[in-house]
């Protein structure tokens, strides 16, 4: 499936790229947003594109005026200093998981494919399989409740412990069967798949996603030039809450002016063309001088 950049028109509206300005795409992925920015900031404007997964950016190396960095955006300030990149007029964070990860990575991000429970964007300390098969019941329950906001967290954690004693839980389909046993039958046929929250929680835990987001936001404000713009697209309530609270706090401190009173949502037409955009929320702010 081709990756379609979410809220692309709105991203350009709020970043407002002009000729020869420089931007950072902290989650460049397949490059959809970055290439649209490069169209607007020609002839000399540049984009610094950061991507944690080296597989995703292999096809972007030949794009002119694009500086690619395979790293975690939590290291934003170090990256900017290393590449002596600036002045920076805008920063984008698109926190959605890419279509490539779901469709082609083979790492167990999607419950629609029978794959090993890896869920890592890059080789770090532990996999989802390790969490499921070695963590304590209370630890598993905690991440399901906090990161997945899963109402059946306790029951799912208990079922995982019970099933892994029979044999290790190594694949996505096996995990789905375990979740299915744990939850009430009336929740099996909701609009959102019953395993969605479990998969979300595991992915967030494996990749330390919420802590990374908290770390990058304050760095982004420091890196931006006065009147520079920050645009963040989140896809679940935990991320959106972090962004909302951060911008509110910085606004109270007089550091930024919030440009979006309420989060910007995709149009019905965009959701029709790209169903994965349905949960996207965009927030934007302008750094005060």
Image (cartoon, grey):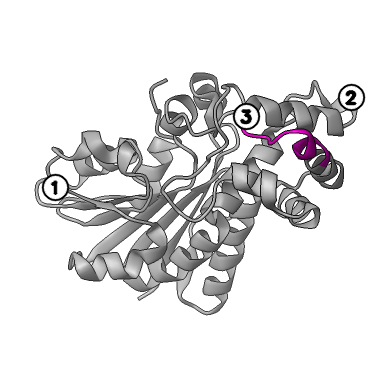
Q: Is residue 275 magenta?
A: no
Mark closest to the chain's N terminus, 1 or 2: 1
Task: Classify 10 Å Cα crowding around label 1: few (below 14), some (14-19), many (20 and above).
Answer: some
Q: Residue furthest left?
A: 43
Q: Position of residue 150 (x, y in %)?
A: 78, 44
How far across and how far down the image is residue 231, in percent?
43, 53
- Tell me, yes or no, whether the highlighted magenta stretch contains residue 164: yes
Residue 62 sits in quarter: top left
Q: Could you say which disc has been placed on residue 5 in the image?
A: none
Q: Position of residue 209 (x, y in %)?
A: 53, 54
Q: Which residue is mark 1?
A: 65
Q: Nearer the viewer, mark 1 or mark 3?
A: 3
Q: Which residue is mark 2?
A: 186
At numbered mark 2, what does the secondary structure look like: helix, strand or loop? Answer: helix
Residue at position x 33%, y 70% in the image = 77
- Give the mark nearer the N terminus: 2 vs 3: 3
Q: Is residue 267 visible?
A: no
Give, as a single range, the part of the protein colored magenta: 162-171
Residue of label 3: 172
Residue shown at 50% from the left, 24% from the top: 274
- Say whether residue 285 is left or right of residue 80: right
Asked if residue 75 is positioned above or below residue 115 in the image, the reply reads below
Q: What is the secondary structure assignment of the residue under circle 3?
A: helix
Q: Is residue 275 visible?
A: yes
Which element is circle 1 on? loop
Image quadrant for the N terminus? top left
């Amino acid at each position: 499936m081709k990756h379609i950049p979410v809220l692309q028109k709105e991203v350009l509206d709020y970043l407002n790229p002009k000729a020869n300005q420089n931007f950072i795409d902290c989650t460049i992925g397949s490059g959809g947003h970055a290439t649209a920015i490069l169209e607007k900031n020609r002839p000399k404007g540049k984009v610094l594109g950061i991507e944690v997964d080296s597989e995703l950016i292999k096809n972007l190396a030949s794009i002119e005026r694009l500086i690619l960095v395979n790293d975690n955006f939590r290291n934003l300030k170090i990256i900017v200093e290393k590449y002596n990149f600036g002045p920076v007029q805008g920063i984008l964070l698109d926190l959605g998981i890419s279509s490539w990860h779901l469709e082609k990575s083979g790492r167990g991000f999607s419950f629609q494919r029978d794959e090993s429970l890896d869920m890592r964007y890059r080789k770090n300390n532990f996999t989802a399989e390790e969490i499921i098969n070695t963590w304590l019941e209370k630890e598993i329950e905690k991440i399901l409740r906090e990161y997945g906001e899963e109402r059946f967290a306790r029951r799912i954690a208990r079922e995982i412990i019970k099933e892994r004693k029979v044999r290790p839980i190594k694949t996505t389909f096996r995990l789905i069967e375990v979740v299915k046993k744990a939850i009430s039958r009336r929740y099996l046929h909701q609009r959102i798949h019953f395993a969605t929250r479990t998969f979300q929680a595991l992915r967030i835990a494996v990749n330390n996603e919420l802590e990374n987001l908290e770390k990058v936001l304050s760095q982004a404000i420091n890196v931006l030039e006065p009147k520079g713009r920050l645009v963040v697209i989140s896809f679940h309530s935990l991320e959106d809450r972090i962004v909302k609270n951060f911008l509110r706090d910085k606004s109270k401190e007089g550091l930024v002016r919030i440009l979006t009173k309420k989060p910007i949502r995709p149009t019905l037409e965009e959701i029709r063309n790209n169903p994965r955009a349905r949960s996207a929320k965009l927030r934007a702010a302008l750094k005060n001088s």
